[in-house]
């Protein structure tokens, strides 16, 4: 009976990983199909950031696959310690509960506030350069992940591994959640590392500030991000 439960847990973990990889590549394809073909300083920076993020995600996925394959091989060769194995798998499932947004999470991190530029435009200036787009929010999310953010929320709505961010006029859609300005992004992780990454010279934050878009970044000793069930 214990071994049947163990096999079930193993099947669940590998099935979850397979779905994660599939959705990751589906989202990548959608993002490329949504590109309008207009090249600006923002889009160049955005594409470079996305390339770096995809490389990082690919390395993480390869490492996870190797880790799970190694563990599966050891289970097949060695006589399992059923109690230790079930405890390990329980902890693994708890991690996936966090990833899928089923558990509240608290910890140190950063808080970012974004708002459109309020300055008067000069003749010939394009207003689109002075307002926040979903691509800008995505870049900030990617930079947070690159610098080790574990859990992220936008205007209180918690992101999960398959969340999508789309633009709809003055608001953005995060999955089915509607977020308007000011956008408040909270991220749990090493607060100093996250802050340093966002304030670095090549960060999207500096580009947004160049266009007079308001960006405030603050370190926080404690941030609480609620589960999806508690929203």
Image: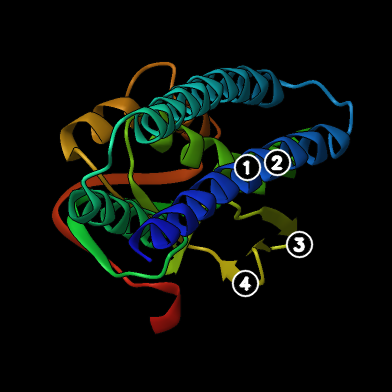
Between residue 30 and residue 11, name the one nearer to us: 11
Please report contact status of discs 3 and 2: CB closer than 8 Å, yes or no: no
Residue carrying label 1? 18
Please report contact status of discs 4 and 3: CB closer than 8 Å, yes or no: yes
Q: Residues within 10 Å of mark 2 (few under 14, many from 20)?
A: few
Q: Quadrant of residue 90?
A: bottom left
Q: Is residue 125 above or below residue 84?
A: above
Please report contact status of discs 2 and 1: CB closer than 8 Å, yes or no: yes
Q: Nearer the viewer, mark 1 or mark 3?
A: 1
Please report contact status of discs 2 and 4: CB closer than 8 Å, yes or no: no
Residue 44 position within the rendered picture, expressed as x and y whole percent measured from the top left: 68, 18
Residue carrying label 3? 168
Looking at this view, name the residue that lies furthest to the left: 221
Q: Nearer the viewer, mark 3 or mark 2?
A: 2
Seen at 44% across and 46% down, the residue is 214
- Using the numbered discs, state the Cα–Cα distance from disc 2 to disc 1 in whole angstroms: 6 Å
Q: Residues within 10 Å of mark 1 (few under 14, many from 20)?
A: few
- Using the numbered discs, state the Cα–Cα distance from disc 2 to disc 4 in whole angstroms: 26 Å
- On residue 22, the disc is 2
Label 1 vs 3, first from the N-terminus: 1
Seen at 33% across and 21% down, the residue is 200
Label 2 vs 4, first from the N-terminus: 2
């Amino acid at each position: 009976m214990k071994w049947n439960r163990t096999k079930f847990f193993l099947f669940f973990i590998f099935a979850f990983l397979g779905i994660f990889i599939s959705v990751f590549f589906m989202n990548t394809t959608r993002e490329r199909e949504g590109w309008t073909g207009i090249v600006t300083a923002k889009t160049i920076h955005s594409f470079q950031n996305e390339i770096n993020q995809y490389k990082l995600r690919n390395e993480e996925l390869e490492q996870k696959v190797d880790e799970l394959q190694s563990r599966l091989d050891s289970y097949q060769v060695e006589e399992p310690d059923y109690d230790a194995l079930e405890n390990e798998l329980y902890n693994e499932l708890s991690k996936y509960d966090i990833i899928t947004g089923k558990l509240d999470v608290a910890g140190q991190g950063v808080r970012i506030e974004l708002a459109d530029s309020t300055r008067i435009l000069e003749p010939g200036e394009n207003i689109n350069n002075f307002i926040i787009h979903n691509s800008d929010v995505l870049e900030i999310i990617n930079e947070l992940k690159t610098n080790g953010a574990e859990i992220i929320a936008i205007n209180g709505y918690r992101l999960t591994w398959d969340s999508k961010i789309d633009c709809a006029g003055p608001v953005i859609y995060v999955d089915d959640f509607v977020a308007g300005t000011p956008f408040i992004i909270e991220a749990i992780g090493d607060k100093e590392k996250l802050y340093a990454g966002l304030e670095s010279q090549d960060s999207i934050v500096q580009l947004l500030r160049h266009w007079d878009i308001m960006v405030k970044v603050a370190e926080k000793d404690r941030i609480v991000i609620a589960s999806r069930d508690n929203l």
